[in-house]
Image (cartoon, grey):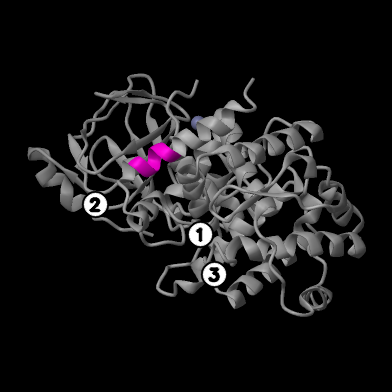
Amino acid sequence: MIRHHPDENLLLEYASGSLARGPSLVVAAHVQMCADCRSQLSTLNNLGGSLLNGSPAQPLQANAFERLMERISQIPEKIIHKSEDTPTPVPVGREPAMDHLPKVLNKLLASNPNRRWKTLTRNLQMCRLKSGQRDYEVAFHCLRSGSGLPKHDHRGQEFALVLHGSFSDHNGIYGRGDFVLREPGQVHRPIATQDMDCLCFSAVAAPVSLTGIRGLFLNPLIPFRPG
Amino acid sequence: MAHKLRHNGNGIAVKASQDYKDDWSRLLTQVGAQRDRQAFERVFRHFAPLIKGFHHSRSTQALNAEAADELVQEVMLKVWHKAPCFDQGKASASTWIFTIMRNCRIDMLRRSQRHQNRDSDVDVADIWDENLENQPLLFLQHKRNERDIADGLNALPAEQSHILEKAYMEGKSHSEISEELRLPLGTVKSRVRLAMKKLQARFVR
Ligand SMILES: [Zn+2]
């Protein structure tokens, strides 16, 4: 059961199109896993539809329709399939459990055929993904079962989604489908639960700084590389 | 079609509920299934001026007139090509066209930011779904939800509906709205939440 969701404000920014591409990827993936948020989103889309219905009609340029039909007649009719199935991406090398991903993440994986997993610490692996933007670092993280991350805080907002396994920190337990938002300055120390490795997808706005003595060793290993 | 408009204090008019007898969803389905150009022309003549007004009118200056006309062309081109995907069990015509329009605007903005690293096979429509998988509702239920939301919008205090309009029509984030209106971010957020609560209370029964 999903217990942690993006709040209404974030969903509204996503629905109205002002949320940046990085965090929107995380929200989209959550929405594809979460029926409650899908229903909220459909209300937010309805609101957009109502505002469109009520907007003051403005006269168009002369021949706007004819101009469009001219363009349409020049483009060969594309065959559009009702369900566009994204092929399941072929795993590269040794990869954590990547099945049952929301379709937006399958698409993202398929567009990153040369992705590589890097070992950051004995227990933490990371795989950066190109996502067509520069403001957020978009990546998968895999934390080995039963292990923890050093205490760290975030200098920028972090949007994350649990895809497999679960982790806990002082705020609670997060399992498959749970959405996690960490504000800059919030310090936390996530620990993966005993039985399974924990796979997360995230978009981070600025470097994650590790506090404490281990951070000294870890920080150079995690340069911030948005994309 | 009779246009009975009520103003909610900001110059934005929301159609009163008795005007929801349109059959745009049926026409759009026809455009998709039969590639019916006459049906498409009717859809165009109705929605294209609304799309323009959404972005450029006396009360909204999100885009200048030329950019708004350009957006209209892009949106209606996509509406034509994507009409076979339109499913009136999932959304009404205006809601579906809204999602296409929002995505065109995101695309437009992205293309204008030259420094952005745009190299990605992930399309806007992969991130912002135009055909939200949802519990299929009866056509009438969509109509009712939409009517309830329109009525709800009319009933909102101006300070709340104003913020919703800025978010949707001008595509502004909460923090941009808070800067522009010189309101604390928390106030903007709570007005949005209050507004959504009121809108949802109308049809969560
Ligand atoms: Zn949710």
Percent coordinates x, y for residue A142 in the rendering:
36, 37
Residue A97 visible in the picture: no
* Residue at mark 2: chain: A
Residue at 68% of width from left, 64% of height from top? B75
The CA span between labels 3 and 1 is: 8 Å
Count of numbered marks? 3
Is the residue marked 1 within 8 Å of ligand 1, measured from its CB? no
Q: Residues within 10 Å of mark 2 (few under 14, many from 20)?
A: many
Residue at 55% of width from left, 53% of height from top? A110
Q: Is residue B127 above or below residue A194?
A: below
The residue identified by callout 1 is B170
The residue identified by callout 3 is B63
- Observer-side mark, 1 or 2, equals 1
Q: Nearer the viewer, residue B174 or B118?
A: B174
Helix or strand or loop: what does disc 1 sit on? loop
Percent coordinates x, y for residue B116 in the rendering:
42, 69
Q: Nearer the viewer, residue B177 or A211?
A: B177
Looking at the rendering, the stretch of residues picked out in magenta corresponds to B187-191
The CA span between labels 3 and 2 is: 35 Å
- Name the quadrant containing residue A72: bottom right
* Residue at mark 1: chain: B
- Observer-side mark, 3 or 2, equals 3
Residue type of the residue flagged with mark 3? Leu
Residue type of the residue flagged with mark 2? Pro
Q: Nearer the viewer, residue B195 or A200?
A: B195
The residue identified by callout 2 is A207
Dots 3 and 1 on the same chain: yes
Q: Residue furthest left?
A: A213
